């Protein structure tokens, strides 16, 4: 029962507006990314001194940068890079987190204690900082960023999955499966893991957004994807020099990061509300 | 009459189809009387109690009829008017003693709260001594100790006693007990019922006892109302209902009481 | 009390673990202090001699222990690149970063508390819906992009500050503050959005609990129920979030420093990373980690004060 605020009256909609808008934004973004694998309007490294810092026009939808490169093409490629890096990062985080979380949560004991202490230590470390340590040791570049962020993301997934496993291992259906002689691995992966799907799904979506933001931050600092390859973060960093004369150079890459994250978070919210 | 309910009708609009939970229910309660309302879950008994306590939510609910408490209409009264009565003249205790107390506030603070609202001139020391008296009144051992504790440090039965103490602190004329024993062990249930009985006699406080447990209601109440699907099926003195039930629903309810109890 | 001690012990162990891991990580990379001092094209004999002299051939644990002891004493080693004590390089810059993080944190709490409570109380209303939409968008904005936009709008269009015109706190504190407030807003805005969303959700979640019904049954009005009962409970998850946010802001200011051209810890860290100036990187990372862990400790303590259930669990 709720005593303050309003509750929604009338029929509950099948698809909440969040979900619809989120799905639309994400859909368009994914289409653009998919397209960028095969086609960009211009070559992303082709310089054209005649159109240096050109304003957006029909020829160059988002204008040109300080080398006369087409910003729209570079934004597309940058989105693709960001998306791939974020996806790989989340995959490493999810797989690592599920493995650690499932085993520690299910078995408990000293292994759980030790691993959880380590996880706590890594968790206490902000992910960008961990990535900086990684990069300063192994050097810059996209695969190091993926590895660094991936490792940084493991703890949050591990914690969530562990919590779910602790909850489920005490449930009667798991106990009866144990009594029936079902193997431990089968219980873990077939009987329990699918039940953690909803929780896992929403943390994957949050994780994806954090990965996008972290990747953008790192390439902004110049330690992610290296030039001349395009990335949204490094474009933002370059654009700052020309902020006064060519504000669109900053606006479009930034807008794309926002849309990428916004679409996903609306989608995640909408899925939770359903 | 202390409490008079006339043609109370409650409908909810928070789902696709409007849901009528109480149909034109009328009954009354005299001062110092213990009235029991029995019925299975979904019979509308709790909603009736919530309406009397002024706790129906404000949105999506349609209320018709009237509730007179000492001649004042409460059902359509303003929130401000209602608040003057709540906790002061009418108090309520709930089914869930484990969650009905605020987990981050001390017991003493929570017991005293109604005094702070309704007796603002009372000094801090006086409030404290009243609260400790109330805690010992509900037969809690070491009331001074309990005063300083947090809810999670007490058992369910103790928490329900704390709820009763905090409901009684302003010496209300009516105590609504909404399934107060359902979540408790059987032995504790009896203790709580006996406590309510004693408080009713000592403080001359009317009790509206809501339960699905006929045997408890029989032990405690002078008069019984049987509700089913939002309607009053039957009402009368406890003896009448038990010895000579007129409606077959009431008979079914009586038959559902475990045999052992009848043998004893 | 027992709870506090336990948490304090955990904090010390965590700090020890982190410092060990960081030291280990930087120990395995090729290239050490002797190599950095002499350059790469040096005869192996001289290098070996210097290594011996600098004590780099001692066992790892012994070196770690020495490093830790001198670190605790405030001796963070010597920069490879600038040949200066790392402590001297950091000390004057640390306040900039810390002050920025603290101001951002203050802005976040001061704004998100009332907004969160208001939107929870009036959830579903028009203002709540508008704020929810703004929030949703704000959460998706990377703070450095927010910084760029603020530079453009407030620095270039409205000319409220000169982009790049940072003044050191040592020369002109007022000027320092009036510059630093803009990066702080940039850091705080996305965090405000997250914090409002959590606080609103937490308040609404609490408002459905049974004790709220009890509070109303005593004759409390909505404000009293909200401030005396709901808020303290609703703050429990928010405090955790705020603790993480303070750490985030400290690290976030490393990025924002680049946007606003502020010579803080972030600047040193990034240049040291590109020059492979490991003692500096190591010192800064361990220091930030200390602050982060100490923040977590404070959160745990506040937690124990707010939520009485925690204390008992530890005993």
Image (cartoon, coloured by chain):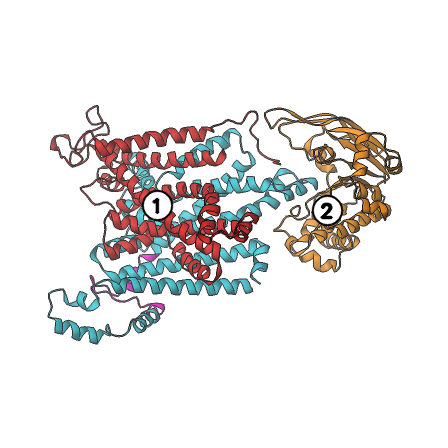
Chain colours: A red, B orange, C cyan
| In the depicted structure, whether residue C227 falls above or below residue B143 | above
* Chain identity of mark 2: B
Q: Which residue is mark 1?
A: A91
- Circle 2 Cα neighbour tier, 10 Å, few/some/many (<14 / 14–19 / ≥20): many
Q: Quadrant of residue A251?
A: top left
Principal secondary structure, stretch drawn in magenta: loop
* Kind of element beneath mark 1: helix
Question: Would residue B71 be seen by someone viewing this image from the given angle?
Answer: no
Residue B87 disc label: none
Residue C271 shows up from this direction: yes
Residue C130 placement (x, y as % from top left)? 46, 31
> Up-down: is B81 above or below A88?
above
Q: According to the image, label 2 marks what residue?
A: B115
As drawn, C71 above or below C107: below
The quadrant of the image that shows the N terminus of chain A is top right
* Left or right: C160 as drawn, with respect to B221: left
The residue lying at 66 percent from left, 43 percent from top is: C215
Q: Are marks 2 and 1 on the same chain?
A: no
**Bounds of the magenta segment:** C70-94
- Output the chain of dot 1: A
| Residue A10: quadrant of the picture | top right
Is A186 placed left or right of B254 in the picture?
Answer: left
- Whether residue C96 is situated above or below residue A32 in the rendered picture: below
Q: Position of residue B160 (x, y in %)?
A: 72, 49
| Labelled pair 2, 1 in contact (Cβ < 8 Å) | no
**C74 falls in the magenta region:** yes
Viewer-proximal residue among B220 and C293: B220
Q: Position of residue C26 (x, y in %)?
A: 27, 62
């Amino acid at each position: 029962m709720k005593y303050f605020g309003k509750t929604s009256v009338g029929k509950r909609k099948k698809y909440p507006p969040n979900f619809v808008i989120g799905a639309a934004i994400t859909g368009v973004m994914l289409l653009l990314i998919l397209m960028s694998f095969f086609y960009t309007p211009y070559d992303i490294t082709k310089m054209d001194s005649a159109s240096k810092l050109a304003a957006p026009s029909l020829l160059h939808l988002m204008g040109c940068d300080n080398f006369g490169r087409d910003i729209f093409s570079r934004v597309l490629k940058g989105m693709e890079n960001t998306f791939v890096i974020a996806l790989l990062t989340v995959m490493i985080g999810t797989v690592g987190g599920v493995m650690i979380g499932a085993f520690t949560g299910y078995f408990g004991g000293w292994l759980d204690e030790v691993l959880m202490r380590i996880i706590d230590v890594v968790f206490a470390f902000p992910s960008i900082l961990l990535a900086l340590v990684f990069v300063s040791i192994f050097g810059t570049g996209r695969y190091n960023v993926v590895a660094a962020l991936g490792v940084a993301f493991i703890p949050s997934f591990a914690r969530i999955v562990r919590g779910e496993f602790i909850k489920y291992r005490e449930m009667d259906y798991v106990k009866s499966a144990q009594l029936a002689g079902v193997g431990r691995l089968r219980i873990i992966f077939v009987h329990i893991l699918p039940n953690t799907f909803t929780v896992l799904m929403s943390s994957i979506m949050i994780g994806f957004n954090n990965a996008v933001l972290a990747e953008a931050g790192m390439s902004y600092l110049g330690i992610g994807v290296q030039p001349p390859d395009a990335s949204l973060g490094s474009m933002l960093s370059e654009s700052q020099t020309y902020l006064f004369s060519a504000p669109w150079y900053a606006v479009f890459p930034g807008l794309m990061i926002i849309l990428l994250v916004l679409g996903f978070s609306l989608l995640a919210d909408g899925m939770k509300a359903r | 009459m202390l409490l008079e309910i006339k043609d109370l009708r409650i409908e909810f609009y928070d789902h696709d189809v409007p849901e009528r939970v109480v149909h034109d229910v009328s009954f009354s309660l005299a001062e110092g009387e213990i009235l029991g309302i029995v019925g299975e879950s979904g019979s509308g008994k709790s909603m009736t109690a919530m309406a009397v306590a002024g706790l129906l939510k404000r949105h999506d609910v349609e209320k018709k009829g009237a509730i007179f408490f000492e001649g004042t209409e409460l059902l359509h009264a303003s929130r401000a008017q209602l608040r003057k009565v709540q906790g002061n003249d009418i108090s309520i205790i709930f089914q869930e003693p484990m969650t009905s107390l605020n987990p981050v506030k001390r017991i003493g603070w929570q017991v005293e709260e109604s005094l702070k609202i309704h007796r603002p001139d009372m000094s801090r020391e006086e409030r404290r001594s009243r609260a400790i008296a109330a805690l010992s009144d509900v037969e809690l051992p070491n009331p001074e100790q309990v005063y300083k504790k947090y809810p999670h440090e007490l058992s369910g039965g103790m928490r329900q006693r704390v709820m009763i103490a905090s409901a009684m602190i302003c010496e209300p004329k009516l105590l609504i007990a909404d399934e107060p024993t359902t979540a408790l062990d059987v032995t504790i249930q009896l203790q709580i019922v006996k406590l309510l009985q004693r408080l009713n006699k000592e403080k001359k406080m009317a009790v509206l006892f809501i339960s699905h447990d006929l045997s408890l209601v029989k032990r405690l109440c002078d008069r019984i109302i049987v509700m089913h699907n939002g309607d009053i099926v039957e009402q009368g003195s406890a003896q009448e209902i038990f010895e000579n039930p007129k409606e077959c629903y009431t008979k079914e309810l009586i038959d559902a009481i475990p045999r052992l109890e009848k043998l004893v | 009390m027992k709870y506090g001690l336990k948490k304090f012990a955990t904090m010390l162990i965590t700090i020890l673990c982190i410092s060990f891991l960081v030291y280990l990580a930087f120990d395995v990379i090729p290239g050490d202090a002797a190599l950095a001092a002499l350059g790469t094209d040096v005869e192996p004999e001289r290098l070996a001699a210097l290594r011996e002299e600098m004590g780099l051939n001692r066992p790892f644990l012994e070196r770690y222990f020495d490093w830790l002891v001198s670190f605790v004493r405030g001796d963070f080693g010597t920069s490879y690149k600038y040949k200066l004590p790392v402590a001297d390089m950091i000390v004057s810059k640390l306040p900039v970063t810390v002050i920025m993080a603290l101001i951002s944190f203050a802005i976040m709490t001061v704004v998100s508390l009332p907004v969160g409570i208001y939107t929870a109380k009036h959830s579903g209303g028009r203002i709540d819906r508008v704020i929810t939409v703004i929030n949703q968008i704000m959460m998706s904005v990377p703070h450095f992009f927010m910084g760029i936009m603020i530079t453009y709008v407030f620095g270039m269009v409205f000319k409220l500050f000169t982009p790049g015109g940072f003044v050191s706190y040592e020369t002109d504190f007022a000027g320092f503050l009036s510059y630093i407030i803009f990066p702080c807003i940039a850091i705080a805005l996305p965090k405000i959005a997250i914090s409002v969303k959590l606080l609103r959700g937490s308040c609404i979640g609490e408002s459905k609990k049974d004790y709220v019904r009890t509070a109303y049954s005593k004759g409390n009005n909505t404000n009293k129920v909200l401030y005396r009962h709901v808020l303290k409970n609703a703050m429990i998850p928010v405090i955790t979030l705020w603790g993480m946010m303070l750490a985030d802001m400290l690290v976030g200011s490393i990025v924002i420093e680049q946007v606003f051209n502020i010579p803080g810890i972030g600047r040193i860290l990034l240049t040291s990373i590109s020059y492979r100036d490991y003692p500096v990187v190591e010192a800064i990372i361990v220091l930030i980690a200390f602050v982060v862990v100490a923040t977590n400790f404070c959160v745990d303590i506040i937690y124990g004060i707010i939520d009485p259930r925690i204390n008992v669990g530890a005993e």
